[in-house]
Image: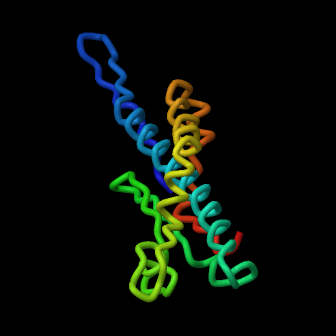
Amino acid sequence: MARIPNPVRTRKDGVEIVSNVDRAQFTIHELIRAANRAVGGHLRKRMMREARKMQGMKRNRRVGRAFQYWARRRETDLIIGSKHNTWYGAEQELGTRGQPKRAIIKDTVMAEVNEIRKIQGAFLSAIEDDNRARGLIDTEDEGKNDEND
């Protein structure tokens, strides 16, 4: 669990100066991460829905574990993809000689651009209100990646 930095207090000539720069940077960083986790979960559900439409995949358990997202802490970015070394990974996304191009990940992301903007905007507009921002930052949800939805 991340610790919220305390304000830096300095005194000079009887005047106390309080700097909340570290706290503001922490809040912005965590709101970006929370927004990335929300977008990743949303896109993963949509990708699984598209994958289940494929022939023979409606009740297959592998589809529920096929797609993942990673919201990285240091880089504050979001990576969406399929698991390593799987038949439904790069071969179906890009297409090969024996496998037609299905582009599940790319098509889903392109179709959901407006929804991504809405989710990101909801989190980042919370910067104005510190209490609302603290409510959106869920530090217990570290790296949560639902196996089956």
Residue 85, horizontal then vertical, whole percent = 43, 86
Residue ranking furthest to the left: 13
Instruction: In this rendered view, identify the residue nearer to me: 34 or 91.
Output: 91
For residue 20, which quarter of the picture?
A: top left
Quarter of the picture containing the C terminus is: bottom right
Compared to residue 72, the image places residue 21 above or below, namely: above
Compared to residue 29, the image places residue 124 above or below, namely: above
Residue ranking furthest to the right: 59
Residue 39, horizontal then vertical, whole percent = 55, 52
- Give the residue at x 52% y 70%: 68
On screen, residue 131 versus residue 90, left or right, reads: right
Q: How many discs appear?
A: 0
On screen, residue 89 versus residue 119, left or right, reads: left
Q: How is the image coloured?
A: rainbow
Instruction: In this rendered view, identify the residue nearer to me: 41 or 87.
Output: 87
Residue 121, horizontal then vertical, whole percent = 53, 35
- Give the residue at x 47% y 61%: 106
- Give the residue at x 29% y 24%: 10
For residue 67, which quarter of the picture?
A: bottom right
Instruction: In this rendered view, identify the residue nearer to me: 15 or 32.
Output: 32
On screen, residue 33 versus residue 45, left or right, reads: left
- Give the residue at x 58% y 51%: 38
Residue 140, horizontal then vertical, whole percent = 59, 58
